Image (cartoon, coloured by chain):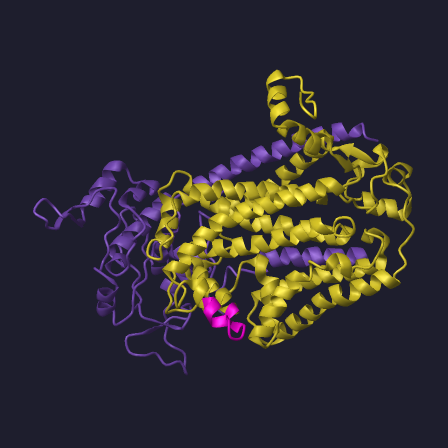
Amino acid sequence: MMRTMKSIIFAAAAVAVSFGFTGATKAHEGIELPEQAWAQSGPMGRIDKAQAQRGFQVYKEICSNCHSLNLASYRNLKGIGFTEDQVKVIAAGVQVQDGPNDQGEMFMRPGIQSDRFVKPFANDKAARVANNGALPPDLSVMVKARHGGEDYITALLTGYAEAPAGVSVPDGKYYNKYFASGTIGMPQMLFDDSITYADGTKATALQESKDVAVFLSYIAEPTQDERKALGIKVILFLIVFSGLMYACKRQLWADVH
Amino acid sequence: MALYPSKFKNPLINWIDARLPIFTLMHHEYIEFQMPRNVNYLWAFGAIGMLLLMTMIATGIMLAMQYTPNTLLAFDSVEHIMRDVNYGWLLRYMHANAGAFFFLAIYVHIFRGLYYGSYQKPRELIWILGVLIYLLMMATGFLGYVLPWGQMSFWAATVITNLFSAFPVVGDPIVTWLWGGFSVDNPTLNRFFALHYLMPFVLLGVVLLHLSALHITGSNNPLGIEIKGPQDSVPFHPYVTIKDLFAFSVYLILFSVFLFFMPNYMGHPDNYIPANALVTPSHIVPEWYFLPWYAILRAIPDKLGGTVMMFAAVLVLVVLPWLDTSKVKSLVFKPVSRLFFWVFAADCILLGFCGANPPDGIWVVAARLGTIYYFAYFLVALPLLGKFERPRPRPASIAEAILKGGGSVHAHAATAQPMEKA
C-alpha cells in the first residue's frame, strides 16, 4: 500500500517535471507543431553550420527587410563557419550610422564586425507604418521566446493556408493556424525557389524555413554548442568524482559497524 | 593566558585561536559534533541547500557587476551577459537553475522534516527559523524573477504586488508604496534589484541561526530517538562530510543536466519577450516552485480570501510543532499518520498541477479539494492522529535498532542505506 502510494507520488512528480509545467511542443492551445529533426537538438547535437549559413542567406535576403536582429553582431557570424575575411565583407556591405563627427554631424560608414545588425526601420512607428500597422518583432531571441522554438518558426513560416469556413480574416491579415490568434500580419514570405542557395541545396519553402530556424537558433544563443560541450566534460568529471566519493564513504563507514 | 586554552599543533593557528577562537568553534561544530549514526541521505539536503545558496550568492555578485536595473536596459543587459561577457551564459544559467534546484533541495529538506518529525520538541526553533528561511527564499526568488524584465517578470511583479491591494483601506496605498509609483515601472525594478541583492545575506544570517539552533539539539534521525550515548553517534567529520560530498556530487550531476542541456526548461518562453505593459500574456504562471501556493491563491473565489489563505498556508507551518500532538517523532512507527503524510505529499503535487493549469473546470474543483486537504492535514489530522494513533513499539536506542537488526522497523529505517547495516 505504502509502496504503491510512494511510487505513484514519485511517478507523478516525474511526470510533472517532464511535461506538466511547460508544454514544449504546442504552439498554443490545441495546435500540435510538426516536429522536425534538428542537428542541434540534444546534448550531443551541434548547430549544422552549413545549414545556419543558408539560414543567414534567407534572413539577409528576405526576413531582414522587416525584422531586426538587434542583439546580434556581425562578428557572431564567425560562429557558423564564416571566416574573418568573409565576415568583414558581409559587414562592409551595410551602411551604419555613426557620429557625431568633429563637425557635430552624424555620418554613414561601411559596417565593421563589431557593429550590431542594422535595423530595417528607424523606429517601431516607422516599422508599423510600413507594415499595415503590425510591428515585425525583433528575432534575436525568437527561438527561445516561443513554445516549440525551431519547430514553431518552421511551422509558422510554412503554415499559411486558406482560412477555414467561419474564420474571418481582416484586410491585410493572413490565416496561419500556428499563430496564436489565427491571423497574422505577415504574408507568406518563403516559397519554393525564393532563394538560390550557393551550395546547391534545393530551396523548397520547407528547406528555407528550417534553414532560417537554425540560423535564428544560433543567434538566440551563440554559445549553445560551447555550453553542451562543457556540460559533457563537467558531467563526466562529476560521475568519476561521485564514484570516488562513494568508495571513500563505503570504506570509512565500514568501521562503524 | 586565555580563559579557554587552544590546543592546535600549528603555532600560527594556535596563536590566532587563542585570540579569536574560530578554529575551536569550527572544530567543535564540524569535527567533534556528533551525528546520529543512522541518518540517511535525506539528511544531506540541508547541506545541499547551503551549497546552492553559496553558488547563488557567488554567481549573483558576478551577474550584478554586468546587470543594469533600468527598464530600458535590463532585458538587453541580461542578453549582454549571455553574449558578450566571458562565460556570462554560464553564470546566468547557473544562477537561474540553481534557484530552482535550491527550492528542490529545500522541499526535500522540508518533507524530510515532516516525515521524521524533526520539528518536534526540542527542535521547534530550528523549524520556525526554517520557515523564515523559506519565506525569505520565496521573497528573494520572486524579486530575482522580475530582474530580467521579460513579459513574465513584469506580469509576475504586477500580479503579486497587486495581491496587497486586496486588503481594505490600506491595500492601495501599500501597493503604490511597493511600486514607488502608480504602476510597476523603473522605481519598482530598481528597488527589486536592491532588495534581491540584500535578501540573500539576510537569508544567510538566518541560516546561521538555524545552524546554531541545530548544533545545540543535534540532528534528528530516521528513528526519531535522541542520541543516548557515544554508541549511537559518529563524529561529523569525516563520516558525515564524506557522505555529504557524495550527495553533493550526485545532486550536481542532476543540476548539470539541466544547466548544460536544458537551461531554459524550467523557465517560460514569454520571459524572452521584453516586458510590455500593454500586452498581457495569455497565461501568467509563476515558477514551478510557487505553483502550489498559486493554486491555493486561486482556489478561493475572493481575492482577499485567496491572499489570506495563501499566506496562512505557509504560516501554518510556524505552529506545526504544537499542532502535532504526538509524542513520537518518526512516522516509521505511525502507519496511519504515514498514510496521511503521503496523501499530503500527493496533495502538494496535485496543487502544483492546479497552479500550472488555467483556473477553470476540473482544476478549480481539484484546487479547492487540495486546499481543504492541505489545511485539514495540519489543523485536523495531525492534532487528532497524535492523540488517537497508538505508535508501534520503538527500539530503546539507535544502536540497538541498528546492531540487532531484523524486524520491519529496522528494515524500513535502513532501506536508504543498506551498507550501514551491521
Task: Name the quarter where the C terminus of chain B is drawn.
Answer: top right
Q: Evaluate whether residue A46 shows in this view.
A: no
Q: Residue at x 70, y 66 (%)?
A: B374
Percent position (x, y) of residue A242?
Answer: 64, 34
Relative placement, left or right, of A67 versus B297 is left
Q: Main secondary structure of the magenta part?
A: helix
Q: Residue at x 69, y 64 (%)?
A: B347
Q: In this picture, is B332 found above or below B348?
A: above
Q: Residue furthest bottom?
A: A166
Among the chains pictured, the one given purple colouring is A
Percent position (x, y) of residue B42?
Answer: 71, 45
Relative placement, left or right, of B401 versus B249 is right
Percent position (x, y) of residue A198?
Answer: 26, 47
Q: What residue range appears in magenta?
A: B164-175
Instruction: Residue B369: name its quadrant.
Output: bottom right
Percent position (x, y) of residue A147?
Answer: 46, 60
Q: Residue at x 51, y 59 (%)?
A: A24
Q: In this picture, is B26 found above or below A18?
A: above
Among the chains pictured, the one given yellow colouring is B
Q: In this picture, is A236 found above or below B79?
A: above
